[in-house]
Image (cartoon, helix red, strand yellow):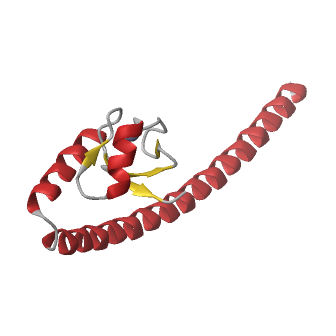
Amino acid sequence: MIEYLDTIENLEQQIAEQEKDCTELDQQIDEKKAILEKEREELQIRLAELDNRAEGISDGIDSELVRIYNVIKTKKGSIGIAPVIAAVCQGCHLNIPPQMYNELHRRDSLKICPWCERIIYWKEG
Ligand SMILES: [Zn+2]
């Protein structure tokens, strides 16, 4: 009987320790949650600022170009424009056809990557 009581006490002690561990873990989770929530809020503020800036910038650009950019951006899920460095589109990392690359270098017309369909522009490598 005394042995049983001892076993029960031991088990109760183990349970108490595990409950303490759980409480500590809960606290850690709550702290991490608070940190992440704060980061999320900061990122949302930054995103709003960037959206405002983008609107301000797009006011000064050809509206047809902005329309095309927005269509591509929506289709691609975020990035609608990519530089081409040494004939390689940085959006999809595929080679631009030589003729198109030459035209791109002249910078006199709008070019779309034939592979990922992003707006591309020439950039020195
Ligand atoms: Zn591409």
- Residue 116, position in %: x, y? 34, 36
Ligand 1 quadrant assignment:
top left
Residue 106, placed above or below residue 72: below
Does residue 79 show up? no
Q: Quadrant of residue 49?
A: bottom left
The residue sitting at 15% across, 74% down in the picture is 60
- Residue furthest toward the left? 63
Q: From the viewer's side, name the closer residue of 22 and 56.
A: 56
Q: Is residue 15 left or right of residue 61?
A: right
Nearest the eye: 80 or 46: 80
- Farthest residue to the right: give it: 3
Quarter holding the N terminus is top right
Across and down, in percent, residue 8 comes to 78, 32
The answer to whether any part of residue 44 appears in the image is: yes
Q: Is residue 100 left or right of residue 8?
A: left
Taking the image as shown, residue 39 lies to the left or right of residue 70, namely right
Find residue 65 and report its horizontal and vertical position in percent.
16, 56
Q: Position of residue 91 (x, y in %)?
A: 42, 44
Residue at the (19%, 75%) spot, across then down:
56
**Which quarter of the figure has residue 77?**
top left
**Residue in the foreground of this view, choosing between 66 and 31:** 66
Between 4 and 60, the one lying in front of the other is 60
14 above or below 82? above
Name the quarter where the C terminus is drawn: bottom right
Q: Is residue 106 left or right of residue 98?
A: left
Q: Is residue 43 positioned above or below 12 on the image?
A: below
Name the residue rendered at 32%, 66% in the picture: 47
Count of numbered circles in the view: 0
